[in-house]
Image: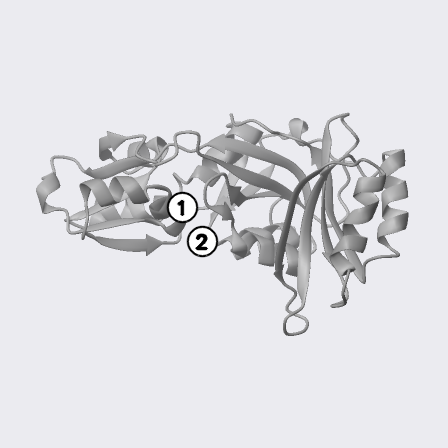
Amino acid sequence: MTDISNSTKDTKVAYLGPAGTYTQLAALRQFGDECIYVDCSSIDDVFAAVENNSTHYGVVPVENSTEGAINNTQDCLIDSNVTIVAEKVVSIEHNFLVRKNSDAANIDSIASHKQSLAQCRKWLSANYSGVKQVECASNAEAAKLAQSTQGVAAIAGEMAARIYDLEILDSKIQDQKNNSTRFLILASKNTETEPSGNDKTSLLLYTENKPGSLFRLLQPFEELQISLSKIETRPSKKEAWEYVFFIDFEGHVKDDNIAVLFERLYSSAVEIKVLGSYPSRRHSD
């Protein structure tokens, strides 16, 4: 069993870096200041760090409330053998950052993660229409670029502004004010959590490409009155035009009614991969 609330100064946590990302913020809010934090250059590297036991945990973004799923994370969940042991929902407030004492009129490009650029689409159109946009691996990477390159502005969080000594020209520039991102806390394969009474389970379901497959897959949830919180599809990578379903639902694998659900699902799905059962967090921190 695992209890992430018992993390210590020796606990190692991988996150999508560099320092100053919203993922680091989610990690700090989950584990506190005493852990050893390892910044990774990609989501794939976070998964690898957990899978090869270089770190005890990993933190990755999985979906944004306005821009939807993070495809890279979903693909890694398909391919890896890690377990989801918790989730964290963080309110996202984007800021427009420049080098201190810069002239806003001389900005020739704006850097950020592609989802952050999309989340500020209207603001950018109204204030910097026609200015080149540069996609970066993370918001913090964009902040580093703004710090080192004349004429480059960045869209990132307040923590990135502090770390990279940038000036906030405008704050809360995201188009949707109630903007939040859900992050997953990952641990090694077969790590288990105990039911909390308010849990969520994440699955991958592979079905045959036959008429009525999706209906047969969803029917047990309806019959057992188990609430689905998410269902999405991604290419299965096994056969052309075959898909895998990502499903989140309320309940824990150790709950009696969920055991009945699995009995019925196994008769409807070609393959089932349990990603984890963990306490549900509906609201942002």
Please name the residue shown 77% across and 47% down the image: 190
Q: Position of residue 163 (x, y in %)?
A: 32, 35
Asked where in the image residue 252 lies, by quadrant, the reply is top right
Assess disc 2: are there few (<14), some (14-19) or many (≥20) residues with their C-alpha within 10 Å of its C-alpha: some
Image side of residue 245 versus residue 212, left or right:
left
- Residue 133 appears in the picture as rendered: yes
Q: Position of residue 81 (x, y in %)?
A: 70, 55
- Could you tell me if the residues under marks 1 and 2 are in contact, i.e. CB atoms within 8 Å? yes
Q: Position of residue 255 (x, y in %)?
A: 85, 34
The vertical placement of 53 against 27, above or below, is below
Image side of residue 24 versus residue 281, left or right:
left
- Residue 80 appears in the picture as rendered: no
The vertical placement of 53 against 34, above or below, is below
- Dot label at residue 18: 1
User: From this viewpoint, which residue is outermost toward the bottom?
Assistant: 240
For label 2, the residue is: 41
Image colouring: one colour
Asked where in the image residue 210 lies, by quadrant, the reply is bottom right
Image side of residue 245 versus residue 16, left or right:
right
- Helix, strand or loop for disc 1: loop
Q: Nearer the viewer, residue 153 or 37?
A: 153
Spatial CA span between label 1 and label 2: 7 Å
Q: In the image, what residue type sits under mark 1?
A: Pro
Give the mark nearest the N terminus, 1 or 2.
Answer: 1
Q: In the image, what residue type sits under mark 2?
A: Ser
Q: Position of residue 173 (x, y in %)?
A: 30, 34
How many numbered discs sit on the rendered protein? Answer: 2
Q: Nearer the viewer, residue 102 or 50?
A: 102
Q: Nearer the viewer, residue 32 or 202?
A: 202
